[in-house]
Image: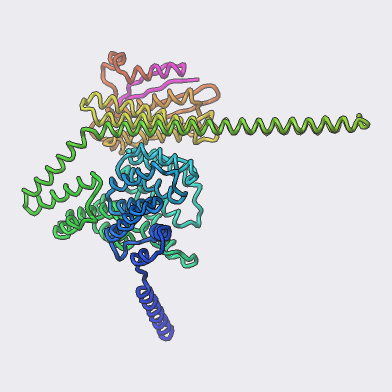
Amino acid sequence: MVKYFKKMFFSLMICSLCIWYSSAQDSATKPDYFQEFQNQKGVQERFDYFFGVPNRYIEDSAYDWQAVVNVYHNNAQKVKDSSSVTKYELMQSQLYYDIGDFSKSVAIANQLYKKIETLDLESKKILLDLIDNNYAKLGLYDRQFEIRNEKKNLGLTDKVIFYDIYSNLGLHRKAMDDYIKDKLKTIREDDYFGQAQYQSNVGNYLLLDMSIPTALTYYKKAKGFIDVYLNDISREKTEQEITKGNLLKAIIEGNIGKCHALLKEYDIAIPYLENSINLINEYNKGKFSSELVENTLELADCYLQKEDYDKAKDYLLKGPQHDPVKIENILRRNRLLAAYYDRIGDYKNSVEYLKRNVRIRDSLNRNESSMKKQQLAAVAGQEIEYSKKMMEQQKKDLEQSRSDLQAKEERINIVFISLIFTLLGFAGLVFAYLKSIKNQRLIADQKRIIEASLVEKDSLLKEIHHRVKNNLQMVSSLLSLQTKNTRSKAAIEALEEGKSRVKAMALIHQKLYQNDDLSVIEMQGYIESLINSVQSVYKKGGHNINITIDAEGVELDIDRAIPFGLILNELVSNSFKYAFPEDDENGKIYIHLRKNGGQGYFEYTDNGVGLPEDTDDRANSSMGIRLMNRLVNQLQSTLNIDKTSEGVRFWFNFK
């Protein structure tokens, strides 16, 4: 045993020496990117080197690079070398973006966009990516569509995507659903970087939607994948791939730290945030990073909560590269500085930072809501228009296929007719045999056409249900935006009820396009999803209520499912709002749905406070009861209400 440990010790010593020697060699032979850039012979070589270096600012800052590029640019202008001027202006735009001056970056890029036809394909890609990224940073989401459409037309991307734009406009769940649908089946199991990026992006949407525990689960999966990717010695990686991998790891660890901070687990959050900042400083040196700003502010907040004011101040007063650009980060930094000065007793500075936030919010509140509505409407309109064009193109392709098939069939007919005339001597058996073959082929072709038409019909129906669900979700989001700008409590309640009803209908269409069978909806899963949706609206109640659903195996068509869903939405909403006003720990809701042949039965009970004594008089004035009566009439039935000793019972039969 002693000999074994000695061997292990010497092996570890040798490995350590090898690693030390290798790192010493790497540091000794580390290239000077800035000098190498200046040593390039021509503008094309400098252009390729500039955009090919993964971490160009590791030794010299972006301002040093900018000074040299400006000299090259001025020299090219003096000799009127328009091609060189264009390439140096692309570098200038990238440098301004890296510094964080997005307005200057996009101004240069937009000037180059006017003459995009004169650029080569590589320069077009760099230019369009720059404009797209700048518009995202500046919040000009509706303008991104034009740039992304241009990328698709040039063949630089397969299709125009909208999910990141919808997320920036606040529709994080819609963005996540579209992203998962678009990406999930395209990532290989052995693509560890792609898997890490996918899990991290899903976590981002959940974090923005404040689903913190679920987001943390996805981030931990992403960290596992990126660690495997970086430690995989079986695949040789370039310096650019290593840099890209470590930057993704920095973002993932930063987001894990944010999740723990939001869960008030500050001691766990701090190491993740500090490691993320160190990785960004190492692999993204010299470039502006919003993640660096956000992680620094989060770290300062953690130390404030732990009452370590000196460390909190250090992170709040970091250098220029930590200065926030986004309005929300500026507001947060001012808020944290106000809290810091308040806790150390410097109330004058505390009030000053609070005043700054008030001034910023006053200027934002004038235009922010209307601008967001306009951008949301513009993006939604563009997506609908894009979808229409895609469907029209698919229709044209289908018509062309049918035309080609018909032409082919005509040619086959001509061949057969010629063959028949050639083989007149074999009129009997041969003619019958050939005719039989022809008929079989015709039947087979028609069968293929019919099967293709059925597949196309199913696909179009699913797409229609998906679009209807997305449009209803957009209506729900617009109602949410209107709620934020409404002060009347009655109006807010009415808008929330309307939003709940819209969500109930949207769930029907969601279940339809997710089903293989488009004619019916499985009601057990739909009822569970509907109750989760209603619970999300009434966040302060309903979570301790014991809800029993007995609808296993029941399926309804859309004509019955929509009124049924709206009826159930009203009943569950009323239970959450009125049935358990004080303590819902012993609250119970029972939902029973059965269908036997052509007859169905529905029952809903709760053990709450029950209905008031004047229920019959108020039924005519209550919108909810009137709505349920009308919906039950659509099901060719009558709503029955029984007052029990504990709670209330609603039931009806339907066909």
Q: How many marks?
A: 0
Residue drawn at (28%, 47%), measured in percent from left and top? Answer: 104
Coloration of the structure image? rainbow
Give the image location of residue 60, x and y in percent.
29, 64
Residue drawn at (34%, 62%), measured in percent from left and top? Answer: 56
User: Is 636 colored magenta in this rendering?
Assistant: yes
Give the image location of residue 180, x and y in percent.
44, 44
Q: Which residues are magenta?
A: 629-655
Whether residue 588 is visible: no
The reply, left or right, for residue 159 in relation to residue 170 is right
Query: Residue most toward the right?
Result: 425
- In what quadrant of the picture does the N terminus appear? bottom left
Residue drawn at (8%, 54%), measured in percent from left and top? Answer: 344
Residue drawn at (49%, 34%), measured in percent from left and top? Answer: 513
Of residues 118 and 262, the one nearer the viewer is 118
Give the quadrant of residue 292: bottom left
Give the quadrant of residue 412: top right
Whether residue 97 is visible: yes
Of residues 25 and 5, the one nearer the viewer is 25
Of residues 586 and 316, the one nearer the viewer is 316
Give the image location of residue 127, x and y in percent.
39, 48
User: Is 19 colored magenta in this rendering?
Assistant: no
The reply, left or right, for residue 585 in relation to residue 523 is left
